[in-house]
Amino acid sequence: MTLLEIQDVTKSFGGLKAVDSVNMSIEKGEIFGLIGPNGAGKSTLFNCIAGVYPPTSGSIFFQDQNITGQKPWDISKKRIARTFQLVKPFGSKTVLYNVMVGSFSRTKSPLRARDRALEVLEKLNLADKKNILAKNLTIADRKRLELARALATEPELLLLDEVMAGLRPMEVEEIIVIIKGIRDSGVTIFVIEHIIRAIMALSDRIAVIHFGKKFAEGTPTEVSKDEKVIKAYLGEDYVIA
Amino acid sequence: MLLAPSKPFLRNRVKEVIMDLILQATVNGILMGSIYGLTALGLTLIFGVIKVINFAHGSLLMVGMYTAYWLILLTGINPYLALIVVVPLLFFFGYYMQEIVIKPVFKAERDVREPITVIIVTTGVWYVLDNLSLILFGAEYRVVKTSLSGKTFLLGELIVSTPKFYGFVATIVTAVLLYWFLKKTRMGKAIMATSFDRDAASLMGINQYRIYNIAFGIGTATAGVAGCVLIPFYYVFPTVGVIFDIRCFIIVVLGGLGSIHGAVLGGIIIGVIESVFAQFMASTWTEGIIYAIFILILFIKPSGLFGARQDW
Amino acid sequence: MKIGLNRKATNYLLLFLAIIFVFILPLFLKSPTYLQIMILLFFYAYLTTSWNLVGGFAGVLPLGHSAFVGIGAYTSTILYLHYGLSPWIGMFAGGLLAALVGVIIGKPTFQMRGAYFALTTIAIGEGIRVMVENINKIGPFTVNGPRGLLIPLTGTSFVNFQFLSKIPYYYIILTMLIIVLGITYIISRRRIGYYLAGGGEEPEAAQALGVNVAKYKLIAMAISCFLTALAGTFYAQLMLYFYPKGILGLDLSFEIAFIALIGGRGTIAGPILGALVLRPVNEFSRIYLSGFLPGLHLVIFGLILIIVMIYLPRGLQEPLSKVYNWFADKLVASFSFKGAEKG
């Protein structure tokens, strides 16, 4: 069943078309990957879905409901969660506090929010760090915290924006396992990533975006054999981890 | 206030008088406004370059005024000659204020999105400076007679105050010098570079903190110029800085952060509004109008008339 | 058997003792001067704690809060002078009005960046003061411009919120302070507190987690302004006289903000600690030093502000809580030891 439907979405900034008539649909339960060179429009698309700004034209449907142009907090309430490419932890607060801000979206009770947050931290192996201030975490742990916070909102769809940037190969492996675990627990995942190996290993399907336009889509195998994709990436400064 | 005379002749005469009044007020406003712009030049440089919100700017102006006052009182020299002493003195005052007081706070808040502590620290400096001068010099309003005080000259039918006219000239000269300095000299370009992207500038070998010190010094020195300009016709007293402080912020926002011509033009606009409206209502209401305009600008176009869109 | 006190119980015990202490203090402190100093101390602690809801928790820097003190004072006093309405009721009317004004001001200004927001609050605060100074009457109500309002002495009367002795005022402001602290504590533990803290620190992240940051900031603003106005009425009834420069002035706004900042904004203890440290400094230097060095207390204030901000940006509560923790831990240790002996 189609969970997220992106219809003809265009986003222009002044004269620049960051996203150009993109069509995409994401099925429930899958991990859908989005790749493309820097500046191709990936984060812009995410921001349109997440409500940071409305698309210039086109529509976005979630569970058959039109969510185009809604505010980020309303989108979150509809069970769409997102992480940020440049992580934004609440630095002066503890790990537990950070995640509780997320779990409060599901309950008003501080006790239940706390319990729920601890559960999520357990799942992501961060429970032992629950009283550490977020600003004192390593980058890898901050990424996990970002993930934990988003998960605490109990989303149906999780948008991951370059969650592996800046991680060492071993940390990348760990995160891949975690993400797969999240999918197995019933969350649909839409992933933007630069690290090709990771996204090929993770995704059920992949779309490729370049200059704001989608120009390939399919399973990882299909896409990696696509001539256009190969041509576009020859000479591209791409991270192959 | 406006009478309605029955005879057309009288009506015309009244109109003429009012027009004269407004014209005179406008000229006064332009002159005084340009001086307001002069006081705001330093602030726009500091605000625009270092992105430091210096609430103590008015107090620095006050220091400049008192320095000029004492110098002139004790030596009787021409206020514009006093510049030779006042400007370097205030440059170093500003340089070290940035180095000692602001830098440590600024460094600590490097990565914080909104460096509020700097505002607090500069307000502390404001309190300290204003009250120190209260203790040292007493609360009385002082004025010193200079060769310029009270002189006027006629421009057609308009009476122009000589010291204010000199101030107008001084403003233009200072603004042009500042502009030339920033665009043409090596140090100036370094300052501009640092203001656009301090990390990039620092990667190119520019010592950002030294730049900040110098920029702050220059900003304060400009306040020193303003101090000398104001002395011939303005009272000096410990809290004189407060009025100018708020004015300067309004002008800087109006004219646009970091814009030299914006500061001068913004000052002139404020000066004209103040002067013209003062003909028709009490001065406290004109103050209110200026605040209202300030708030309106903040809502409609916070980047001001000539400012660039700031992302901070 | 080990009779031990854990840290949590110790905290509650010490808090309880502190409350008892302040409640019985007037029995020992007979001098009206000292009572007045304590009253003003609680008054400022109250104001800064209320301010903290916006300036600390919501992460913005409002520098025009005296406007709400003034709204409280003027509203209740005007209603009393004109309609004979008990200032207790007028107090709540003032609070509601202040909350309304606060929300109206907050809605457009909260979108601004920190420095611009601070400047705007200063401009609005000063704007309101200038307006009040220039108006003699609003409709049928006398406002009296710069001369301020004088409340006629009626002798001790609860309904009229006037007492000849300082002691009732002491207990009233103390109760108000405890209530405000309670409100702050409850907010910090509940969802609204978390949302305010998150929204203040990283608004985009908070929004992505379902927080309508603007809405919560406005809620905090409304509560803060309401509470601040109540203090305005209290002040009016305490002094029986107030005027625009004093009650609506920039000095008051700044003092409130700076006490909170020096104490430690965003924490519960911070504003109180700030008031505890700075008010006595203010009072004593004003009383003893103003004679021959007017303004010295403000110089000291300014210097403290600068030094604290450079070396202790989180406020005095940071080192002081460490001291408290050390002390409380020692207490726990000594109690446990005694318990072990008994067993």
Image: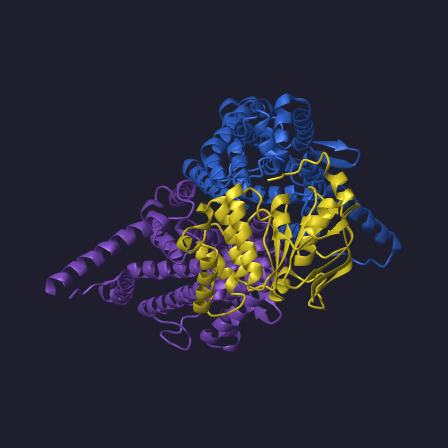
* Residue C61, visible in the rendered structure: no
Q: Residue furthest left?
A: C342
For the point 87% across and 52% down, the residue is B9
Q: Can you tell which chain is drawn blue?
A: B
Within the image, what quadrant is residue B304 found in?
top right
Q: Position of residue B239 (x, y in %)?
A: 50, 42
The hue used for chain C is: purple
Q: Residue furthest right?
A: B8
Q: Position of residue B143 (x, y in %)?
A: 54, 35
Q: Taking A82 as reference, is A210 above or below it?
A: above
Q: Position of residue C329 (x, y in %)?
A: 25, 55
The C terminus of chain C lies in quadrant: bottom left
Q: Position of residue B87 (x, y in %)?
A: 56, 26
The hue used for chain A is: yellow
A47 sits to left or right of A131 = right
For the point 57% across and 26% down, the residue is B206
For the point 30% across and 59% down, the residue is C33
